[in-house]
Image: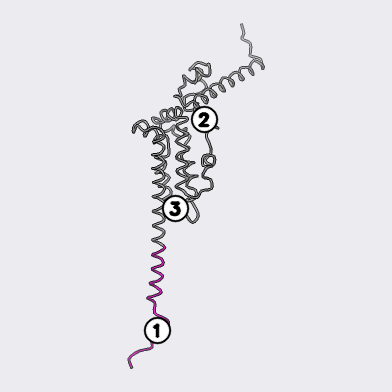
Amino acid sequence: MQQREPTTSQATGRVNQKMRTRTAIVQAAAGLIRTGRDVTMLEVAKAALVSEATAYRYFPDLVSLLQEAMAGQLPTPDEALATVAGSRDPVERIAAATEHLLRHVLTYQGAARAMIAATITRPAAADARPGLRFGLIEHALAPVADGPEALDAAALAQLKNDLAVVVGAEALFCLTDLCGLDPEDAIASAVHTATALTRAAVTRADVTQAGTTQAGTTQAGTTQAGAPRAGARKAAVTRRPA
């Protein structure tokens, strides 16, 4: 018996059902992320009322699901640093950026831990991580990126790399899991380190700039003081033994 081709309405119905299933999985993941609890494909499937196998048919791994579920939930750097928007102090701005990011990690730490666990052994998949720290650090250091207070390019790049080690989930989990600090103390420790790094970089730049300015002034003064007057040079030329 020849199998009948599905009608247009049947095909549309199947497409819509797949869309509803996918949406349910993403929404279940987003809801689980907001609880801060551990996020696994099995737990997401249970919350979406589908089988784990079905969830994997729509998303090949947990990372791809987390990416889609977290889209739109992450604040922009402008939103994150709204409290220090009027400040030009890079130390104050880095303190705000560090605290904001680490509190965000604490709120969604189940997803943060799952993302790290899923990518730490697969470096090629690291781009799947949100990388919030980089945008925040860039925005926080805007006052010293250009203008009269700017750090030189090498110093700015080094500071950004230094801060990337501190302003992130890995640093927070090291302090809570390995050092045994409670979350508030862990955040305070990370903020202390981030601001110390920033203050040191800015201070070095100020000292270097002051030294360069002083050396230039001294050199100009020495040249002016050591140069003979035009009349004296002329006299020196014309006074020859008779």
Q: Earlier in the sequence, mark 3 or mark 2?
A: 2
The Cα–Cα distance between marks 3 and 2, rounded to whole angstroms, is 34 Å
Residue position for label 1 = 232
Question: Which label belongs to residue 70?
Answer: 2
Q: Counting other residues with Cα less than 10 Å from the Cα at mark 2, is it few (<14), some (14-19), or many (20 or more)? A: some
Question: Which label belongs to residue 83?
Answer: none
* Residue 223 falls within the magenta-colored stretch: yes
Secondary structure found at label 3: loop
Q: Counting other residues with Cα less than 10 Å from the Cα at mark 3, is it few (<14), some (14-19), or many (20 or more)? A: many
Left or right: where does residue 4 sit relative to residue 125?
right
The Cα–Cα distance between marks 3 and 1, rounded to whole angstroms, is 45 Å
Q: Earlier in the sequence, mark 3 or mark 1?
A: 3
The span picked out in magenta is 213-242
Residue 1 image-quadrant placement: top right
Question: Residue 164: where, in percent of width, then height?
Answer: 42, 41
Question: Which label belongs to residue 151?
Answer: 3
